[in-house]
C-alpha cells in the first residue's frame, strides 16, 4: 500500500509539473495573439465580445494545447527531460503560429491583424483559424 501511495504522490507531482508547463505555453500563446492583433485582446474579447478575435485566440490555444499534449505523451520517462522537451516543443508551436500569422498577413491583401480585430465576420478569420490548427497538428506530428 505504501508503494502505491508513493507512486500516486510521484504521479500527482509529475502531473502538476506538466500542467504548469502547459499553462505557461497557453499563456505564451495568448500573449502571441495579443501582440499580433491591434488593441487589447482581453478587452476586445471579454468586454466587446469580438467573435472573430475569439475564434483566432481559441484556435491558437487548441493548436498550442495539441502540441503540448503530444509532447507530454512522447516525453522522456525522466521528469526533468520530459518537462524541458514539452516546454521546448510547446514554445516552438507558439512561435510557429505567430510566424504563420505574419506570413498569412503578408500574403493577403490588407492588414490581417486589423481585420480579425473588427467583429465584422471577415472571411480571413477562417484562414487564420485553419492555419493555427494546421500548425498545431504539424508540430504535434513532428514530435511523435
Image (cartoon, grey):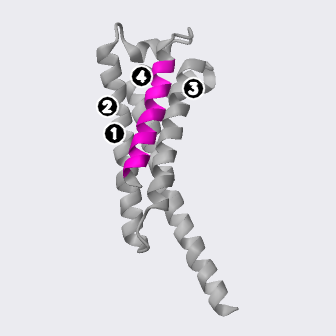
CB under 8 Å between discs 1 and 2: yes
**Residue at image coords 38%, 34%:** 97
**Residue at image coords 43%, 28%:** 131
- 136 lies left or right of 102: right
User: Considering depth in this image, is 66 or 121 the residue closer to the camera?
Assistant: 66
Q: At numbered mark 2, what does the secondary structure look like: helix, strand or loop? A: helix
CB under 8 Å between discs 2 and 4: no
Q: Is residue 136 above or below residue 54?
A: below
From the top left corner, tell me how far across and down residue 66 is, in percent. 50, 46
Q: Which residue is denoted by mark 4 in the rendering?
A: 37
State the CA–CA distance, disc 2 to disc 3: 19 Å
- 59 lies left or right of 37: right
The magenta-colored residue range is 126-142
**Residue at image coords 48%, 34%:** 133
Q: Disc 2 or disc 3, which is closer to the eye? A: 2
CB under 8 Å between discs 3 and 1: no
**How many circles with numbers are drawn on the protein?**
4
State the CA–CA distance, disc 4 to disc 3: 12 Å
Sequence-first disc among 4 and 1: 4
Q: Disc 4 or disc 1, which is closer to the eye? A: 1
State the CA–CA distance, disc 4 to disc 1: 15 Å
Q: Which residue is denoted by mark 2 in the rendering?
A: 99
Q: At numbered mark 4, what does the secondary structure look like: helix, strand or loop? A: loop
CB under 8 Å between discs 4 and 1: no
From the top left corner, tell me how far across and down residue 117 is, in percent. 48, 16
User: Considering depth in this image, is 43 or 129 the residue closer to the camera?
Assistant: 129
State the CA–CA distance, disc 3 to disc 1: 19 Å
Amino acid at each position: 500500500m505504501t508503494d502505491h501511495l508513493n507512486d500516486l504522490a510521484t504521479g500527482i507531482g509529475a502531473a502538476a509539473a506538466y500542467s504548469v508547463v502547459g499553462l505557461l505555453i497557453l499563456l505564451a500563446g495568448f500573449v502571441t495573439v495579443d501582440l499580433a492583433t491591434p488593441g487589447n485582446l482581453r478587452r476586445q474579447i471579454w468586454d466587446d465580445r469580438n467573435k472573430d478575435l475569439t475564434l483566432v485566440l481559441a484556435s491558437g490555444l487548441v493548436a498550442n494545447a495539441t502540441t503540448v499534449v503530444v509532447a507530454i505523451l512522447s516525453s522522456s520517462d525522466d521528469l526533468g527531460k520530459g518537462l524541458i522537451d514539452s516546454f521546448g516543443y510547446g514554445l516552438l508551436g507558439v512561435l510557429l503560429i505567430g510566424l504563420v500569422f505574419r506570413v498569412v498577413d503578408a500574403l493577403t491583401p490588407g492588414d490581417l491583424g486589423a481585420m480579425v480585430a473588427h467583429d465584422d465576420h471577415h472571411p480571413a478569420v477562417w484562414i487564420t483559424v485553419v492555419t493555427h490548427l494546421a500548425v498545431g497538428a504539424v508540430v504535434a506530428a513532428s514530435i511523435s
